[in-house]
Amino acid sequence: MSDENQLAALGEIVQEATGIPAARVVPGASFVDDLDIDSLSMVEIATMAEDRFHVSIPDSELAKLKTVGDVLEFLAAAGVPA
Amino acid sequence: MIVATSASRFSRIVGLGEYRPARVVTNDDLAQTLDTNDDWIRQRTGIASRRIGGDEDSVVAMASAATTKALADAGVDPSRVGQVILATCSMTKHVPGGSAQVAHAIGARAAGAYDLNAACAGFCYGLAAASDAVRHGQSEYVVVAASERLSDWVDWSDRASAILFADGAAAAIVGPADSPGIGPLVCGSDGANAQLIGLDDDRRLHLDGPAVYRWATTEMGAAARAVCEAAGVEPHELAAVVPHQANLRIVSSIAKQLGASQAVVADDVVETGNTSAASVPLALARLRREGKVATGDLALTLAFGAGLTWAGSVVTVP
């Protein structure tokens, strides 16, 4: 999976969880400030991402994921193949 | 040698009663003192308003009022009540408990009485205990009252909890039946996550919202299915799904995972907020009062919260 594919997959997850168009899910976008996603929707996104990428995102890590780019970096650090 | 008691009878809920404090507190009311607004609260919780008790609305007074209504609904004289179970976690004085005072207030002065604290799950545990007491011949009728005055424990400057918690009471009368009316209890706990909901060092309610949301939306769907399986009921046979009214998004998630396509999903949280142990019986009583379920319908109850602890069963609507 390339970075672009991971970004596209994350976009699909955000769109399914919140209805926000996947095209708005870009690396520099802040979940709260740019996409207006609340904390409970972030939990839904995290659980869907866990299933999609076969990775664990503990609550302590979730709190640090402020932007779309943060998630991509987390996936890379967690060893999810790009 | 201990003499065996009759265990041949079945049990069911024979009456329900609710008590909702008169004072309605809207989201706009809260926005006058908290950094929040109606849209923000509705989007995250589904709650539009909640009831907050007056000085007269103690845990015992609300439980007694709800129980008196439930006895009238059942057509059962208080003298025939053998036990009173009070499910609550919000008594400001823990000793003595409130159950004996409820028994006295309703006129069941010879009844046994005990308090049960399983936080939000208390009513479902109490229902199972009442069912067993009836089936084993200990008592003809058992009261399961659930009453909470959470407003005494809320930090009204904390928007995360002040928007959620509320006051109210409901009661069920459990009595003998010709066929099973209360399915097997399915229950569990997770003490490793005890810190997620409870009183903080200032003795005020705190809740780790995102963590609790994740737990409830990932674990309670399976719990709901287990409750159905234990009762031998397929989800499509349910007329109602009545999860703990913590948050409408959690309620909707559980209902979606259960897949009870024919069922009405309780949404009492919208006008009631989270009343902990009282939430499931309040929601069930409301569905019945509004004609959304009928006598004999199957309803799934499932309650969960601080502990963490959870419990549920399938019941027939009285």
Image: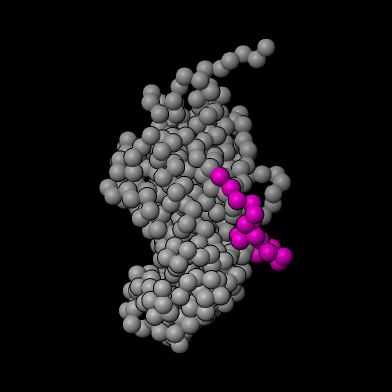
Colour scheme shown? one colour
Residue B300 x/y as whole percent: 40, 44
Near-viewer residue (B72 or B284)? B284
Residue B197 x/y as whole percent: 60, 60
| Picture quadrant of residue B98 | top right
Q: Does B295 lie within the magenta span?
A: no
Give, as a single range, the part of the protein colored magenta.
B188-204
Near-viewer residue (B72 or A42)? A42
The residue depicted at 44 percent of the width and 85 percent of the height is A27
Residue B141 appearing in the image = yes
Is residue B156 rendered to the left or right of residue B44?
right
The residue depicted at 44 percent of the width and 29 percent of the height is B11
Residue B155 x/y as whole percent: 62, 69
The residue depicted at 46 percent of the width and 75 percent of the height is A82
| Picture quadrant of residue B44 | bottom left
Q: Does B197 lie within the magenta span?
A: yes
Q: Outermost residue toward the top? A: B1
Residue B259 x/y as whole percent: 33, 50
Is residue B144 rendered to the left or right of residue A25?
right
Residue B164 appearing in the image = no
The residue depicted at 38 percent of the width and 26 percent of the height is B179
Count of marks, rendered view? 0
Q: Outermost residue toward the bottom? A: A28
For the C terminus of chain B, the quadrant is top left
| Picture quadrant of residue B299 | top left
Relative vertical location of residue B290 with respect to residue B49 in this rendering, above or below: above
Is residue A15 rendered to the left or right of residue B131?
left
For the N terminus of chain B, the quadrant is top right
